[in-house]
Image (cartoon, rainbow, N blue to C red):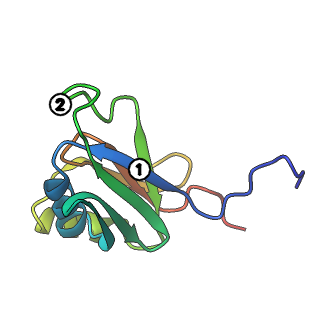
Amino acid sequence: MANDTLDGQWMGVSLTVNDLERSVAWYRDVAGFTVAQTHEREGKLVAASLRGGNARILLAQDDGARGANRAKGEGFSIMVVTEQNIDALADGIRARGGTLAAEPADMPWGARVFRVHDPDGFRIAISTDPRPQS
């Protein structure tokens, strides 16, 4: 690989949310992430780091500086790739009170995928590895 080509080992995402406690609860209790760390400023919760295997999400409380209740998640989707059973994961999300935006389906490129939306409208695709297996 050329020295100027990215060779990422994992990727995380940082999301600014309207209600941090509600979003942490959704990612933890519905989507199945665990809270790795919370971040406080002057005794107030301002962010939380979550993990699901090698997937990382930092949720940060929107401070309103760019407008109250501004649109979030437009034109943006997060993909989490897993070796776990896609249908069982989707069933677990439903059982924990979540609603799927798209049911598990086989894609023409070989992946099996379902989709959910978090409380702020961020779109998340949970997928088997879409890359051809050698």
For residue 99, the mark is none
Q: What element does badge 2 sit on?
A: loop
The amino acid on which the numbered mark 2 sits, given as a three-letter code, is Asn
Q: Which residue is mark 2?
A: 69
**Residue 101 image position (x, y, % from top left):** 23, 44
The amino acid on which the numbered mark 1 sits, given as a three-letter code, is Ser
- Nearest the eye: 72 or 43: 43
128 to the left or right of 88: right
Q: Residues within 10 Å of mark 1 (few under 14, many from 20)?
A: few
Vertical comparison of 108 with 28: above or below: above
Residue at 25 percent of width and 28 percent of height: 71
Quadrant location of the C terminus in the rendered image:
bottom right
Q: Is residue 104 visible?
A: no
Q: Quadrant of residue 72?
A: top left
Q: Which residue is mark 1?
A: 14
Disc 2 to disc 1, C-alpha distance: 17 Å
Q: Quadrant of residue 18?
A: top left
Determine the residue located farthest toward the left in the rendered image. Answer: 97
Residue at 74 percent of width and 51 percent of height: 6
Residue at 56 percent of width and 55 percent of height: 130
Q: What element does badge 1 sit on?
A: strand
Residue at 31 percent of width and 44 percent of height: 16
Determine the residue located farthest toward the front in the rendered image. Answer: 42
Vertical comparison of 125 with 120: above or below: below
Quadrant location of the N terminus in the rendered image:
bottom right
10 to the left or right of 7: left
Q: Is residue 58 visible?
A: yes
Q: Residues within 10 Å of mark 2 (few under 14, many from 20)?
A: few
**Residue 66 image position (x, y, % from top left):** 29, 27
59 to the left or right of 6: left
Vertical comparison of 9 with 22: above or below: below
